[in-house]
């Protein structure tokens, strides 16, 4: 028997209430309308208000991502968990294409080698999403600098105590259109949330 006191909110009502609470607790007015939508989704997905002050997402970068989505750009991720959290665009992860004893096994992590595979398949105009491995983001930057890889946008939100903050700082210094954050926080859920926010903007 179902208790009459149990809440009965539909999913969209829960989301609306969540965003109402978010708006009460954090001021996102310093962001432009596009980047504000991205930051709000990240905060909503993580329930972590720190992202309101640590996310770096310029209007031009988010606009580049939205335009790329509208043109059907491929979305490539470092790990499957990020890919599974993205709703809307076609997404691919090439981690599974990496052979354990392949030529890169001694010099690259599997996630970095997966990004190398992805860059070879999509050398120009892709949206690159790194939500787990700092080494994958570092490899993306190396491919851009040395191999002519030219993504439309890099969502760089890896997590961890080793290399995450540094790889994101390097992304911001690269001049690439990017969404990132300052510090060690990050992860698959926030990276997927950033992409989902841009997908919603692209459908508007």
Image (cartoon, rainbow, N blue to C red):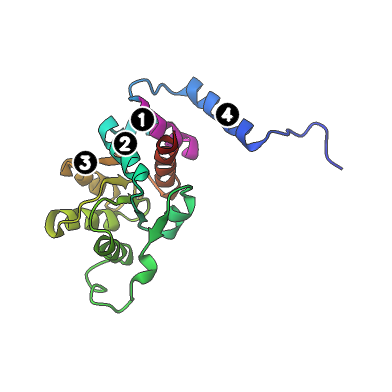
Of callouts 4 and 3, which one flags the residue occurring earlier in the amino acid sequence? 4
Q: Secondary structure at mark 1?
A: helix
Q: Secondary structure at mark 3?
A: helix
Q: CA distance from mark 4 to mark 2?
A: 23 Å
Expressed as whole percent of the image width and height from the top left, the position of residue 138 reads: 23, 55
Expressed as whole percent of the image width and height from the top left, the position of residue 185 reads: 37, 43
Q: Which residues are magenta?
A: 33-48
Q: Secondary structure at mark 2?
A: helix
The numbered disc on residue 62 is 2
Q: Quadrant of the N terminus?
A: top right
Expressed as whole percent of the image width and height from the top left, the position of residue 112 reads: 28, 62
Q: CA distance from mark 1 to mark 2?
A: 6 Å
Q: Secondary structure at mark 4?
A: helix
Q: Which residue is mark 4?
A: 16
How many neighbours does mark 1 have within 10 angstroms: few (below 14), some (14-19), or many (20 or more)?
some
Of callouts 2 and 3, which one flags the residue occurring earlier in the amino acid sequence? 2
Q: Quadrant of the C terminus?
A: top left
Q: Which residue is mark 1?
A: 34
Count of numbered tags: 4
Assess whether mark 2 and mark 1 are in contact (beta carbons under 8 angstroms).
yes
The numbered disc on residue 125 is none
Q: Is residue 198 at all visible to an observer of this figure?
A: yes
The residue at the far right in this view is 1
How many neighbours does mark 2 have within 10 angstroms: few (below 14), some (14-19), or many (20 or more)?
many
The residue at the far left in this view is 146
* Residue drawn at the location 30% of the way across and 79% of the way down: 101
* Residue drawn at the location 43% of the way across and 46% of the way down: 192
Depth check, mark 2 against mark 3: the one in front is 2
Q: CA distance from mark 3 to mark 1?
A: 18 Å
Q: Which residue is mark 3?
A: 172
Q: Is 87 left or right of 92, judged from the image as shown?
A: right
């Amino acid at each position: 028997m179902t208790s009459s006191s149990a809440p009965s909110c539909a999913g969209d009502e829960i989301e609306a209430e969540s965003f109402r609470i978010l708006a009460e607790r954090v001021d996102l007015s310093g962001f432009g309308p596009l980047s504000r939508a991205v930051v709000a989704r990240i905060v909503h997905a993580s329930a972590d208000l720190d992202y309101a002050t640590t996310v770096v997402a310029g209007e031009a970068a988010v606009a580049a991502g939205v335009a790329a989505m509208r043109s059907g750009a491929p979305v490539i991720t470092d790990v499957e968990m990020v890919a599974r959290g993205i709703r809307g665009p076609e997404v691919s992860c090439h981690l599974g294409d990496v052979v354990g004893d392949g030529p890169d096994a001694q010099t690259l992590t599997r996630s970095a080698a997966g990004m190398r595979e992805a860059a070879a398949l999509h050398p120009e105009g892709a949206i690159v999403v790194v939500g787990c491995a700092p080494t994958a983001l570092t490899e993306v930057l190396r491919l851009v600098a040395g191999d002519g890889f030219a993504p439309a946008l890099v969502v760089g939100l890896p997590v961890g105590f080793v290399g995450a903050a540094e790889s994101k700082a390097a992304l911001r210094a690269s001049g690439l259109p990017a969404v990132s954050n300052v510090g060690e926080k990050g992860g698959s859920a926030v990276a997927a949330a950033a992409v989902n926010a841009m997908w919603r903007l692209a459908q508007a």
